[in-house]
Image (tube, rainbow, N blue to C red):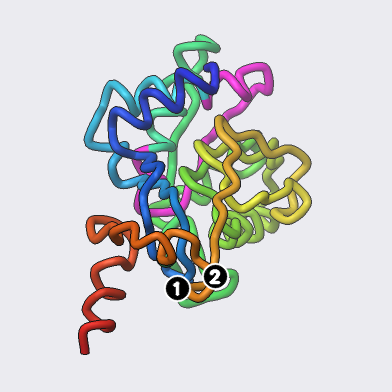
Amino acid sequence: MEKEKLLEILGQAKAIIQDSHIVYTSGKHGSAYVNKDAIYPHTTLTSDLTLAMAKLFSEKQIDVVVAPVIGGVILSQWIAFHLTQLSGKEVLGVYAEKSEQAPGFELKRGYGKLVEGKNVLVVEDILNTGGSIKKVVEMLQPLNTNIVGVAAICNRGNVKAEDLGVSELKSLLDVQLDAWSEQDCPLCKNDVPINVEVGKGALYLAAKQK
Ligand SMILES: [Zn+2]
């Protein structure tokens, strides 16, 4: 999928907000925001995006797609479906759930048996630091799997394959979001209104009024 087309459909779903004034979880300010939760209610858009992700690895003989909960449940199902359609053989979609045990994720419900000895693709919507995906990779390693790679909708943290412990990382979109401290924020200096719909903007304004 071409980047312009991708940005257009993500924009239509309000999954990418640009030219705004956002307060991030980190407390920093910036002009853009990637809202993955806005994607999934639009099932045709989700299908289009996951087909594009499936195509990134369609030559790799994937047997099972694995993703971390919660958004990953949707992603792994769709990508496994599209890989099945593309390859003509059944590709399974499973998900990893949070666990008290290291590395922090586990395959419950008998899904651990489904990945043994298989070619596995790990998928994620937005890579920020890649922390969750790294844990899923660490969870899979002792299970005698061949981790073929990682696919993401958007890599916004400049995450590299080696950061995740895999040989290949592909994303539909790589974005670098500028972020400034409040003191250095050019949007604050120009009195651009804070976006209170997404991120921590509403909390930020509430705290300011105290
Ligand atoms: Zn600001």
**Residue 208 image label:** none
Give the left or right position of residue 191, taking residue 102 as reference: left
Give the left or right position of residue 163, taking residue 22 as reference: right
Residue 49 in percent (x, y) is at 43, 25
Residue range (magenta): 53-74
Along the line of sight, the residue nearer the viewer: 21 or 51: 21
Q: Quadrant of ligand 1?
A: bottom left
Are there few (<14), some (14-19), or many (20+) residues within 10 Å of tag 1?
Answer: some
Residue 203: say if magenta. Answer: no
Q: CA distance from mark 1 to mark 2?
A: 12 Å
**Residue 27 image label:** 1
Are there few (<14), some (14-19), or many (20+) residues within 10 Å of tag 2?
Answer: few
Residue 64: say if magenta. Answer: yes
* Image point (51%, 76%), residue name: 183
Dot 1 or dot 2, earlier in sequence: 1
Residue 48 in percent (x, y) is at 39, 20
Residue 77 in percent (x, y) is at 38, 33
Residue type at the position of mark 2 = Asp
Residue, disc 2: 184
Where, quadrant-wise, is the C terminus in this rendering? bottom left
Along the line of sight, the residue nearer the viewer: 188 or 100: 188
* Image point (44%, 48%), residue name: 32
Residue type at the position of mark 1 = Gly
